[in-house]
Amino acid sequence: MDKVRVVFVCTGNTCRSPMAEVILKNKNNKIEAKSAGVFAANGAPASRQVEILLEEKNVPFTHTAKMLDRNLAEWGDLLLTMTSSHKALVLRDFPEISHKVYTLKEYAATENEKKYDEYHEKAAEIEMKRAAFLHDITKLDTEKQAEKRQQFEAEMRKELSELQTLEQALPSMDISDPFGGTIEQYRTTYAEIEEAIERMIERLDREELEG
């Protein structure tokens, strides 16, 4: 079986997603990990606090920031974002891969997992419908476009209401942002990411066994 390929995504690819990448690489060699940011400056260094934290843990670490692009998005079997807002941006830019985009905590969830699956399936369904609509509407004349858009928006209101109901039943799916904080805040975020990654690995192992 080929290695599972995971892309961790945060804002600038200098704090949370690089920590997630290095944690996973040091915990499991059956999973290939990379990271990127939705607003990254290509080539920027990792946060100094991240470097200090990994030095404390004697974890080898070299990193330069990378913007999430289509090649990397398509390379990953899973794109795991640090927050729901990162996830929304990834879905906006790459709606066709919505079936493999989760927040890290969402994918790693062990309690009420069915709720997360229901929410993700509904969100993916909506994004695919939106992408198909935007593709098809370009073939119509202006008058028909306005009519179809009005019809589509009416259909979507019910879908979005159902999605909101599912979302309200979920706990926060965000990893805390330590950017600009103390080294202690970085330690807290590191522990939060590490716990979620351990659960993520357990889920992948379980799914592999189930075939």
Image (cartoon, rainbow, N blue to C red):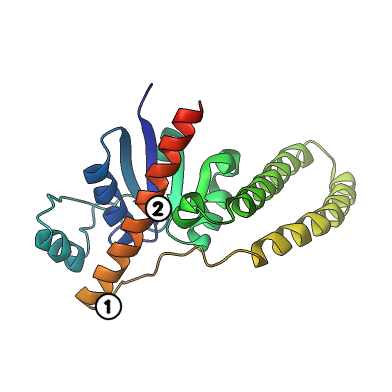
Residue 195 placed where, x, y %?
A: 35, 57
**Considering depth in this image, is 207 or 57 the residue closer to the camera?**
207
**Considering depth in this image, is 74 or 184 the residue closer to the camera?**
184
Label 1 to label 2, Cα distance in Å?
20 Å
What quarter of the picture does the N terminus occupy? top left
Residue found at the very far top of the displayed protein: 1
**Considering depth in this image, is 128 or 167 the residue closer to the camera?**
167
| Kind of residue at disc 2 | Val
Q: Earlier in the sequence, mark 1 or mark 2?
A: 2
- Kindly indicate whether the residue at mark 2 contacts the one at mark 1 (C-beta within 8 angstroms): no
What residue is shown at x 83% (from left), y 57% (from top)? Answer: 158
Q: Which mark is residue 146?
A: none
| Kind of residue at disc 1 | Gly
**Vertical placement of 9 versus 203: above or below?**
below
Q: Tell me the SS state at disc 1.
A: loop
Q: Which mark is residue 9?
A: 2
**Vertical placement of 140 versus 46: above or below?**
above
Residue 105 placed where, x, y %?
A: 46, 57
The residue to which callout 1 is attached is: 181
Number of residue marks: 2
